Each structure stands twice: as structure tokens, then as C-alpha cells.
């Protein structure tokens, strides 16, 4: 373990089988937390859990589709049954949806994006808040995007879903602020992950020219931000969005 900021805490991560979810699960464990991993892929999820255990951490994996209320409830229940409760949750599971003009997007594509990106977070929050109340408080971090803070052409469905999660998070933060429950979002810019590879057709450097820092980020950049928001280092922070995007929310480079 590299630090002990989360020693004795229990954390939950959705979408934990690769990319930002994998890096964050490892970072939470490295900071002392026992981690419950949820994802649809059994092989990939178990691989991440085993990586954490091999490094001396505590981790269990539960196959989870975040659009299914019963499966989300089972994921949270696992944290309580295996490790005694829940203190931290990182709601990371998400899909990018189709690229192209809004008028050309199929209804089925909209449903898929909003079911995962919005319904999945909404369901997770319901069960996580109840679990955190039992522990006298805790921290929930929802993964959004710098595109949840601004608009972009030809990505409207994804952008709308991330704006929805920003609003949902702020509202839930206000509701729970008096219960020692903090709810924030982390808003990544372009991060080298399977999602970015799919969205850019494999060219993960495609956005570099317009990002002020001139490069894509790493999953670990987001993981470090989540550990901060999960820890007492951010004890007076709730209802906020922490952008980790190389300056993307300040503005884009145009030439």
C-alpha cells in the first residue's frame, strides 16, 4: 500500500473491469480500502480483483449490470456482508453511444446510453445512500465528463446523459449534506481507455490538438482525483464537479 488515507474503509466501484474503473479500484485498495468491484465481464472483473489481492489488498468481484435494480442492490449488499458496510462508492459504469448528428440517432441508442449512464447512477445512488447512512456518512463520486459541463457537436446523447448525472449529483448532495454524506463528480477529459478508443476509432491522440495540455490523460489521473474525493482530504467538498481534463473546461485550443 502506498498510503493509508482510506485504511479501514469499504469502497465500491462500478465499471471496474478496465480503464478508469480498474485504475481507481487499484488506487482505492492501495490507499487501504477493501474494494467491491462490479462489472458485466466476469473474466475481466475477476482479473482486477485478483490483481488487488495479489498486491496484498482486499477485493471481491460481483457480476453487475447497473441498469438492473436487483443486481445493484446485490452489489451494495455484498459490501455489507463481506466487509461490514459501505463508506465509499465510485459510480463509473458508462457507455459512449453513437457519434453523429442528433437527427440521425436511433431511439434504441438513446435508451442504451441513458439506461446505463443515468439510470445506472440513479439506481446506485439509492442503494449506496441507504448503506452510507448506516455507517454515519461517507463519500460517493459519480464519473461524468468534461462534456457534462459543456456541449459538443455530434455527441449529443452522451453529452446529455453526463449533464443529467451532474444535475442528479448536485441535487442528491444537497439532500444528504446534513447526514455527513458527500456526493461529488469527477469529470474526465480525453483519457486513454477502451471507451476513448471506440469513440475515436482507435486514434486516442485525436483530441490532443485542442486540449490545452496537448495530450490525453491516463486512467490513473482520474483514480488519484477519486481517492482525494473519497478521503477526508476533501471533507468540506460536496455537490462539486472536479474536472480532470488538461484544461478542457477552460477552453479549447483553436490554433
Image (cartoon, helix red, strand yellow):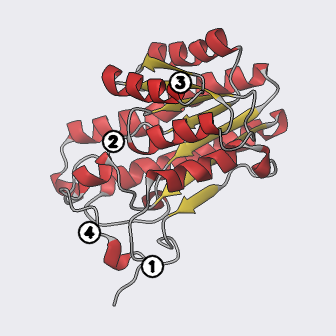
Q: Which residue is mark 1?
A: 212
- The quadrant of the rendering that contains the C terminus is bottom left
Element marked by disc 3: helix
Q: Which residue is mark 3?
A: 53
Please name the residue shown 32% across and 22% down the image: 43
Element marked by disc 1: loop
Element marked by disc 4: loop
- The quadrant of the rendering that contains the N terminus is top right
Mark 3 crowdedness (10 Å alpha carbons): few <14, some 14-19, many ≥20: some
Which badge, 2 or 1, comes first in the chain's sequence?
A: 2
3D distance between C-alphas at marks 3 and 4? 36 Å
3D distance between C-alphas at marks 1 and 4? 13 Å
3D distance between C-alphas at marks 2 and 4? 19 Å
Q: Nearer the viewer, residue 66 or 51?
A: 51
Mark 2–mark 4 CB contact (< 8 Å) = no
Which badge, 3 or 1, comes first in the chain's sequence?
A: 3
Q: Nearer the viewer, residue 95 or 224?
A: 224
Please name the residue shown 20% across and 60% down the image: 101
* Res. 177 image quadrant: top right
3D distance between C-alphas at marks 2 and 1? 25 Å
Q: Which residue is mark 2?
A: 95
Please name the residue shown 23% across and 40% down the image: 109
Q: Which residue is mark 4?
A: 206
Describe residue 68's horizontal placement relative to residue 149 as left or right.
Answer: left
Q: Residue furthest bottom?
A: 255
Which badge, 2 or 3, comes first in the chain's sequence?
A: 3
Describe residue 126's horizontal placement relative to residue 115 as left or right.
Answer: right
Residue 20 appears anywhere in the view:
yes
Residue 67 appears anywhere in the view:
no
Amino acid at each position: 500500500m502506498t498510503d493509508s488515507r482510506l485504511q479501514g474503509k469499504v469502497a465500491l466501484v462500478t465499471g471496474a473491469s478496465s480503464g478508469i474503473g480498474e485504475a481507481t479500484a487499484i488506487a482505492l485498495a492501495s490507499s487501504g480500502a477493501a474494494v467491491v468491484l462490479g462489472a458485466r465481464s466476469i473474466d475481466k472483473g475477476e482479473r482486477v480483483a485478483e490483481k488487488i489481492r495479489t498486491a496484498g489488498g482486499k477485493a471481491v468481484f460481483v457480476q453487475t449490470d447497473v441498469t438492473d435494480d436487483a443486481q445493484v442492490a446485490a452489489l451494495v449488499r455484498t459490501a455489507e456482508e463481506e466487509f461490514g458496510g459501505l463508506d465509499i462508492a465510485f459510480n463509473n459504469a458508462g457507455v459512449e453511444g453513437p457519434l453523429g448528428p442528433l437527427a440521425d440517432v436511433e431511439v434504441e441508442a438513446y435508451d442504451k446510453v441513458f439506461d446505463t449512464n443515468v439510470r445506472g447512477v440513479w439506481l446506485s445512488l439509492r442503494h449506496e445512500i441507504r448503506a452510507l447512512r448506516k455507517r454515519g456518512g461517507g463519500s460517493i463520486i459519480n464519473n461524468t465528463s468534461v462534456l457534462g459541463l459543456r456541449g459538443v457537436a455530434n455527441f449529443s446523447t452522451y453529452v446529455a446523459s453526463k449533464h443529467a448525472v451532474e444535475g442528479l449529483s448536485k441535487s442528491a448532495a444537497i439532500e444528504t449534506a446534513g447526514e455527513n454524506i458527500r456526493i461529488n463528480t469527477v469529470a474526465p477529459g480525453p483519457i486513454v481507455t477502451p471507451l476513448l478508443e471506440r469513440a475515436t476509432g482507435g486514434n486516442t491522440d485525436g483530441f490532443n490538438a485542442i486540449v490545452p495540455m496537448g495530450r490525453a490523460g491516463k486512467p490513473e489521473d482520474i483514480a488519484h482525483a477519486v481517492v482525494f474525493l473519497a478521503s477526508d482530504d476533501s471533507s468540506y467538498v460536496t455537490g462539486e464537479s472536479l474536472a480532470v481534463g488538461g484544461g478542457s473546461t477552460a477552453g479549447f485550443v483553436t490554433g
